[in-house]
C-alpha cells in the first residue's frame, strides 16, 4: 500500500511539493491547492483571514480580547477554514527591534537562531527570547528582532488546544520591514544607496528606520502602543525626523487593516517638515506578506 501511494504521488506531482512542516519554504509554496488560515495577534485583538486552494483571500474577521479568549469563541470556525488545521501567525506585542553592528552572518544563521541563538548573537542572546535578523546588504549593520519566548509558547499552546497547527509564527511588523527592505535593495531602487526613513506600523506597534547616504543610522521601535491616538505613536518617530535633511523621502508602510489610523499617521508625518512623505502600502499589506513569508 505505501508503494502504491508513492506511485500516485509521483503521478500527481504531490511527491515534488514541499512538506507543510518545512518552515524554510514560503507559505504559498507549502499549501498549493490546500486551504490555510492566517492569524494576526495584537495586544487587545485577534484578526484572521482564510486562504483558499487557489491562494486567494476569503473569509475575514476580528475579535477584541486576548488570543486565548478569542480562540475559545472561534475554534470551530477557524478549524473549518483549513484543510488540515495549518495556520500562520503574526504576533504584534512583547517584542523589540534594535539596530546592531557586526553580528554573525553564518550561512546557516536562520537555523542557528532557532536552535542556538548564542552561536549567532553571543552575549546579546537571552534564553527568554526568540529572534529574527535582517542584514544590510552592503554594511555591517543589522536589524535584530527579539520576542518574548513565553508569548510565543502561549500562542502555540493555545492554537494546538484548538486542534490548529501553527506552521509559522512571525512578528508582523518585522516581516513588513524585511519585505520592504528586500524590495529596496534587491530591485536597485535609487534610495538603496541614498537616504530615507521607513516608518512601519502594524496593529498598534511601530518601527522607524533611518538610512543616510547608504548607512543605517537610527532606529526606534515600540510594541503595543495602541491605536487610541496617532499622537502617541508619532512621538516615537518624531525625534528621528529632526536629524534628517529636508526633502528626504519618508515611506509609510502600514498593515492595510487599520487604514483610518494609518491616514492620521500620514498627516502627522506631512506636518513634520519639508519631507517627501509617501504611503507605499498595498491593499491587505500584512495578509499578503504573511501568506508569502
Image: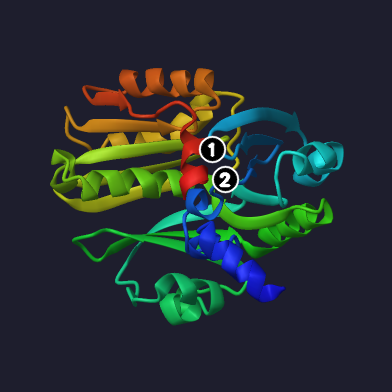
The numbered mark at residue 33 is: 2
Of the image marks 2 and 1, the number of the one nearer the N terminus: 2
* Residue pointed to by mark 1: 54
| Drawn side of residue 157 relative to residue 11, left or right | right
Name the residue located 22 percent from the left edge and 31 percent from the top edge. Answer: 249
What's the colour scheme? rainbow
* Mark 2 secondary-structure assignment: loop
In the image, 93 versus 222, the foreground residue is 93
Seen at 29% across and 71% down, the residue is 102
**With respect to residue 165, does 3 lie above or below?**
below
Quarter of the image where one finds residue 137: bottom left
- Front one among 27 and 6: 6
Q: Where is residue 212 in the image (x, y as percent from the top left)?
A: 18, 46
Residue 28: give x, y in percent of width and height. Answer: 50, 48
Residues at discs 2 and 1 in contact (Cβ within 8 Å):
yes
**Residue 19 seen in the figure:** no
Amino acid at each position: 500500500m505505501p508503494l502504491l501511494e508513492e506511485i500516485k504521488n509521483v503521478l500527481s506531482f504531490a511527491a515534488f511539493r514541499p512538506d507543510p512542516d518545512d518552515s524554510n519554504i514560503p507559505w504559498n509554496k507549502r499549501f498549493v491547492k490546500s486551504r490555510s488560515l492566517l492569524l494576526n495577534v495584537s495586544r487587545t485583538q485577534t484578526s484572521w483571514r482564510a486562504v483558499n486552494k487557489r491562494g486567494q483571500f476569503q473569509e475575514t474577521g476580528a475579535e477584541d480580547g486576548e488570543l486565548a479568549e478569542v480562540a475559545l469563541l472561534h475554534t470551530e470556525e477557524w478549524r473549518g477554514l483549513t484543510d488540515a488545521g495549518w495556520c500562520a501567525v503574526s504576533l504584534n506585542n512583547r517584542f523589540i527591534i534594535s539596530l546592531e553592528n557586526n553580528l554573525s552572518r553564518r550561512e546557516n544563521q536562520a537555523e542557528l537562531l532557532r536552535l542556538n541563538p548564542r552561536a549567532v548573537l553571543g552575549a546579546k542572546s537571552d534564553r527568554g527570547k526568540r529572534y529574527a535578523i535582517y542584514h544590510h546588504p552592503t554594511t555591517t549593520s543589522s536589524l535584530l528582532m527579539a520576542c518574548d519566548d513565553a508569548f510565543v509558547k502561549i500562542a502555540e499552546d493555545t492554537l494546538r488546544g484548538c486542534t490548529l497547527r501553527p506552521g509559522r509564527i512571525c512578528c508582523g511588523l518585522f516581516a513588513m520591514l524585511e519585505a520592504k527592505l528586500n524590495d529596496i535593495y534587491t530591485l536597485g531602487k535609487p534610495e538603496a544607496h541614498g537616504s530615507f526613513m521607513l516608518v512601519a506600523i502594524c496593529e498598534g506597534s511601530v518601527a522607524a528606520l533611518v538610512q543616510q547616504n547608504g548607512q543605517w543610522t537610527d532606529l526606534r521601535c515600540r510594541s503595543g502602543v495602541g491605536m487610541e491616538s496617532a499622537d502617541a505613536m508619532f512621538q516615537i518617530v518624531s525625534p528621528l525626523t529632526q536629524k534628517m535633511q529636508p526633502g528626504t523621502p519618508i515611506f509609510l508602510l502600514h498593515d492595510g487593516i487599520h487604514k483610518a489610523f494609518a491616514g492620521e499617521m500620514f498627516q502627522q508625518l506631512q506636518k513634520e517638515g519639508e519631507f517627501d512623505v509617501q504611503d507605499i502600502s498595498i491593499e491587505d499589506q500584512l495578509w499578503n506578506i504573511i501568506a508569502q513569508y
